[in-house]
Amino acid sequence: MQFLLAFILAAPLIGAAAALLPAPPGLRGKSPEQAVLRHGVSVTGVILAAAIALTLGFDHDAPARFQATTDISWIQALNVRIHLGIDGISLPLLLMTALLFFLCALYSYYKLPEGPSPKAFVALLLVLEAGTLATFAVLDLLLFFLAFEMVLIPMYFLIARWGGAQRQAAAWKFILFTLLGSVVMLLGLLLIGLNSGTFDMVALASDNGRELTHTTQLLAALAIGIGLAVKTPMWPLHSWLPDAHTAAPTVGSVLLAGVLLKMGTYGFVRILLPITPGGMQTFAPYLGAFAAIGIVYGSLACLALARKGNKGDLKRLIAYSSVGHMGFVLLGIATMTPTGVNGALFANIAHGLITGLLFFLVGALKDRYGTADLDTLAGATGAALYGRAPRLGAFLAFAAVASLGLPGLAGFWGEMLALFGAFDPAEGLSRPAFLTYMAIGGLGTLLTAGYLLIVVRRVCMGDPKAKGAAPAALPDIQHYEFAAWTPLVALTVLAGLWPAVLLGLTDPAVQKLLAGGNS
């Protein structure tokens, strides 16, 4: 188990370095480009297999205990250690990350985005995977910061070199926002480490902030919270996200929504809740307010983009939907209750699966039509995917109803538990305020259903033979698309019908985390 976790974190970096080397004789295939793309699929596939083996070897009877741990002294002067481990909170995120990177590598093997060298593309993809996997596995504050920052440069180049229109401006906006947030976050992490004498996240969580004064907790929670809120992204620090999604290549959008946004919310749960509980309790009502505003704001923005004649970009619409969905995650965290935090973690996984699928589907639509503009796709009477490409239309309709939180699918449980947590927040928090946030969140679910059903009506329905409609000939789902999308559909159904699979992992770990490591 210890070796498996270390291998999962090291393999992407080794694979990235190997991707830049010439392919050995016998492995070159038809061309060097095919060889390096096959290399990307192989490396991410091995990492996924190792993550599955790690999950099977995980002691599911003790998910609150850190397992597969490594603890080695690294920088003695600062008491920084190479401390690795997973529990019921981080394991699902680690597994989902490995899965999404493998599916993106598989999709790119057949549909590589236009840009520079495929070698650089595969190497950047693997470096990005290393950073995201490490974020969910490290247990030292400074290592967490390094892993958190490691993803910025690869994602910047994926957007700037392989993206679409306005890619340079979107890439710069992405990196400037996240870097500024990270600088503030680093100050908060240093404040905790230097005042407590350790950067070890397990020791700090067990101490539950007792070694930190209330002022220190307030300052640390504010600084770290700002940095994490930018990455989440929380309204009003979200403005980089729609531009980045719109400009990014398909796999970049999938990874940005499915993995990178989870790094911010994971930091709230892993760092702020157990290490600065006093500061978190002070700021929780404000976090809940921003989350509630984000839920409604994201939905209203999507409704505006979905309206006929507004030239709404489907990728931009889904990006704004992420602002709303991540609002539910932040609302669950703000309640500081086991119910709310479990809901936030469930919604994290559900959003990664469903929104990752949505970006895959919109990318496929853009490849076929040459645009993601909703008015152009819908034509005079609707895009009529049900008639032109029925399987593609069925997948899109499924992803839409999953995203709106239909009972029986994964999106339902996270949002419901977050609202239940807001109904009865932690002791010391204002119940009237959180009841208000719950009501606003309930309104957000209705608005979400509204814009997603409008999208389904405009894109999937219509008369393919009507005058002014889009061309009737449209390729349906290809074999590689089916292979990349089906696992996400299956897991969305599984998590919706059997939520105990995920909640059985997260709940004991959340109970222990909120109790300061004592339960």
Image (spheres, grey):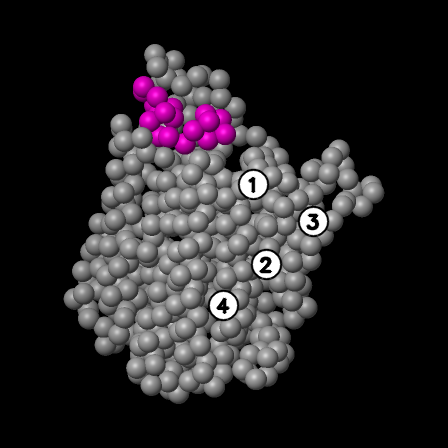
Q: Nearer the viewer, mark 2 or mark 4?
A: 4
Of the image marks 3 and 4, the number of the one nearer the N terminus: 3
Q: Secondary structure at mark 4?
A: helix
Query: Which of the labelled discs sits on residue 19, or is there none?
Result: 3
Q: Secondary structure at mark 3?
A: helix
Q: Which residue is mark 1?
A: 484
Kindly identify the residue that appears in the image at 70 percent across and 49 percent down.
20
Q: Are marks 2 and 1 in contact (CB under 8 Å)?
A: no
Q: Spatial distance from mark 1 to mark 4, Cα to Cα? A: 31 Å
Q: Residues within 10 Å of mark 1 (few under 14, many from 20)?
A: many
- Which amino acid, mark 2? Ala
Q: Residues within 10 Å of mark 4 (few under 14, many from 20)?
A: some
- Which amino acid, mark 1? Ala
Q: Which residue is mark 2?
A: 130
**Residue 498 placement (x, y as % from top left):** 45, 54
Q: Spatial distance from mark 3 to mark 4, Cα to Cα? A: 26 Å
